Image (spheres, coloured by chain):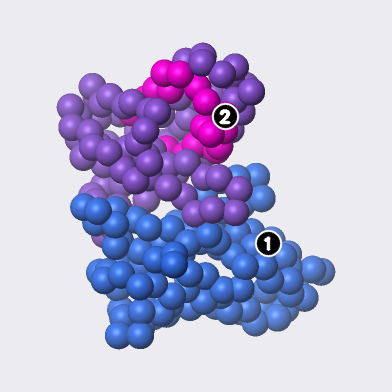
Amino acid sequence: NAGVTQTPKFRILKIGQSMTLQCTQDMNHNYMYWYRQDPGMGLKLIYYSVGAGITDKGEVPNGYNVSRSTTEDFPLRLELAAPSQTSVYFCASSRGLAGRETQYFGPGTRLLVL
Amino acid sequence: KNEVEQSPQNLTAQEGEFITINCSYSVGISALHWLQQHPGGGIVSLFMLSSGKKKHGRLIATINIQEKHSSLHITASHPRDSAVYICAVNGGSQGNLIFGKGTKLSVKP
């Protein structure tokens, strides 16, 4: 099993550009999450999904969109990139709700917006 | 005030030392997680606990729900233990995790 995979590993965007961060898991987990990690700060939840077709906002959703058309995939869309979105993005999945189940993390995507 | 506080922020130890990292939280929870973030950035889950103590190899995690406090201990520390250790609690909206800022551990040979 590959676990949770993310692409790309690193990307530089210009202000105003758009991109999609890809996330795929092969563990048949219902729950998936997107976090961002800023230097010196704890991970912050952007969006999460409890199953295909169901998504909900986390703590810091502004500037992002998600979709969940399959159990395996949970892409994160940045529509108009801003310097404040420079961060490291982690996708994660769990069998049940994060609080009560082990979370499995992808390797991260480092995004730089200039 | 952060809902999850970790101490110390940074910790340097000599190989073989006993290490303790602390986590205090201010919200009601039913589970607490300890995670390890490798120097390369990858994050792995070490423990999830809701009471008492758990042990895995040289790592021991304890929690006191009444005092809202948890500790992560590393016995006989080794340079390969060098990483950032993150505490998280399920006190967020819909039971999602709230993360501490992490403790950066460096173990010198």
Residue A37, placed above or below residue B37: above
Tag 1, which secondary structure? loop
Q: Colour of chain A?
A: purple
**Span of residues in magenta:** A73-93
Q: Decide whether residue A91 is among the magenta residues.
A: yes
Most foreground residue, A75 or B49: A75
Disc 2 designates what residue? Answer: A83
Q: How many marks?
A: 2
Q: Which residue corresponds to the image point at 38% horizontal and 28% vertical from the top-left?
A: A64
Q: Which residue corresponds to the image point at 52% horizontal and 26% vertical from the top-left?
A: A82
On the image, the x and y values in percent for residue A7 come to 50, 25
On the image, the x and y values in percent for residue A100 come to 26, 59
Chain letter for the residue marked with disc 2 in the picture: A
Residue B9, placed above or below residue A18: below
Most foreground residue, B27 or A98: B27
Q: Which residue corresponds to the image point at 48% horizontal and 78% vertical from the top-left?
A: B71
Disc 1 residue type (three-letter): Ser
Chain depicted in blue: B
Compared across the picture, whether A13 is left or right of B35 comes to right
Q: Quadrant of the C terminus of chain A?
A: top right
